[in-house]
Image (cartoon, rainbow, N blue to C red):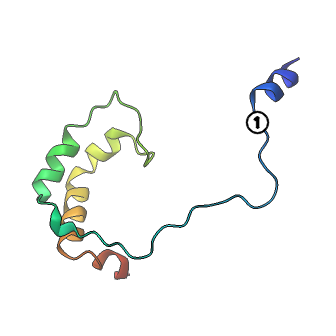
Amino acid sequence: MLSEFFQSVYTSEPEGDVHVPTLPTVIEESMDEFDFTKDDVEEKLNKLSDDKCTGPDQLHPRVLRECSKELGQFVSDIKEDPGHWTTTK
């Protein structure tokens, strides 16, 4: 009985290759268009509410809030030198 129920609810996945969209390799927009500071990023992250669910990044707002200082610095560094985070080892 449960087996029939689950079979009726869940769809079967297509066999074979699943199409994965390709992302552009070159980003044409510049972070220079945005005006923000490390403190701005920290302030926004600190205002996130614990009673909200995760976003598309699958990170709970509490995690983002708890890491606001580190993330603020990271985003600020990317703004200053967009290629730096991709080349740092």
Q: Secondary structure at mark 1?
A: loop
Q: Is residue 57 left or right of residue 11?
A: left
State whether residue 87 is above or below residue 19.
below
State whether residue 81 is above or below residue 18.
below
- Quarter the C terminus occupies: bottom left
Q: How many marks?
A: 1
**Residue lying at 16% horizontally and 61% vertically, measured from the top left:** 34
Relative depth, front residue between 60 and 9 = 9
Query: Looking at the image, which residue sits at the far top?
Result: 1
Amino acid type at image mark 1: Thr
**Residue lying at 39% horizontally and 40% vertically, measured from the top left:** 60
Determine crowd level at label 1: few under 14, some 14-19, many 20+ residues with C-alpha closer than 10 A: few
Q: Quadrant of residue 66?
A: top left
Point out residue 15 in the picture as x, y percentages from the top left corner: 82, 53
Q: Quadrant of residue 8?
A: top right
Point out residue 37 in the picture as x, y percentages from the top left corner: 11, 59
Point out residue 81 in the picture as x, y percentages from the top left corner: 21, 77
Instruction: Give the residue pinned by disc 1.
Output: 11
Q: Quadrant of residue 1?
A: top right
Point out residue 6 in the picture as x, y percentages from the top left corner: 79, 26
